[in-house]
Amino acid sequence: MCRGLGATGAGKGRDVTKGYERAIGHPLPLIRTPDLAVVRQILLSEFPQAEEAIDFALRDLIGRPFVRLTPLLVLGPPGGGKSRFLRRLGELLGVGVLRVDGSNDAGASFGGTERRWYSSEPCRPFMAVNRFLQANPLVLVDELDKAPVRSDYGRLWDGVISFLEVETASRFPDPCIQAELDLSWVSTAFTANETWALPGPLLDRLRVVEFPVPGPEHLDRLLPALLADIARERGLDARWFHAVDGVELAALRSRWGGGSVRLLRRMLDGVLRVRDRTARRH
């Protein structure tokens, strides 16, 4: 990944790379591809409306001994679960997931910032490698289509292109580390609501798959995963949350007719708060 630190600068190099010592000059493991049938089964249970998207994503890993996804763009309307899908895909594949907010992340910072700046940082893919101490983590760029278009400090779109092809990613000249990094095993995935605003050279390097929103017929299958997510965020074991009962399910059915999973999640959170208040009164 990184054989050593660039020699430029008297002591600055040691300062800007503090915290990256375990990833510089040390070999890092590649995460092996797990049983894809098991991964598929779990993803289908959590995203029952997205069978085609799941198969499209996993097909890229068939026959690969180690996890590496060809750059992937998951496209769909807001609230459909695109970001959660990619996060869960990474978790089930056993790789760390570093999320980058495309609408807020400064363009130049994705590819690293030069060592002369006080706030200098390595590129985002190397930050993911260092955080998870894996050679093949996943970098998830959310809301790629909402990235700022001003080019004063570089655009996110331009910053990510170097990491989308093995040839350039394997010899990336990081401006902070000041050394060539081999980041060819780092997977990159993106979400977007639409593609019309994205530049052609970027789209040409991405596999694009539509991610459909769920309908009311998927409600029963969506709830267990959403309950588990809420439990995890509250720091609880999911077994503390019993399944939604008939009255609660009827309330959700009457208010959610399909569409945004984000909205369904908020409704479910409200149901759980009512459940908690009722339990405390008794």
Image (spheres, rainbow, N blue to C red):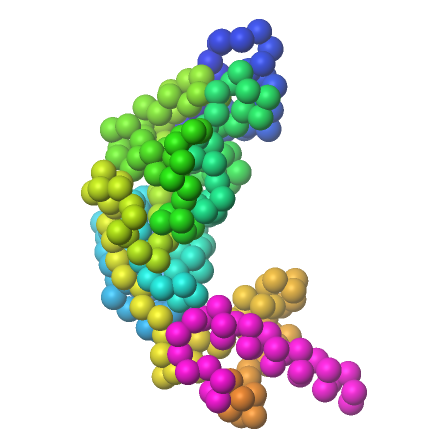
Within the magenta stretch, is there residue 275? Answer: yes
Picture quadrant where residue 178 is located: top left
- 268 relative to 38, above or below: below
Residue 5 percent coordinates (x, y): 48, 16
Most foreground residue, 27 or 20? 20
Q: Which quadrant: the N terminus?
A: top left
**Which quarter of the rendered picture does the C terminus lie within?**
bottom right
Q: Image quadrant of residue 47?
A: bottom left
Q: Position of residue 249 (x, y in %)?
A: 51, 87
Residue lying at the far right of the rendered structure: 281
Considering the whole magenta stretch, tell me its main secondary structure. helix
Using the image, determine if residue 205 lies above or below residue 120. Answer: below
Up-down relation of residue 58 to residue 138 (above or below): below
Which segment is the magenta one? 253-282
Q: In which quarter of the image is residue 161?
A: top left
Residue 105 visible to the viewer: yes
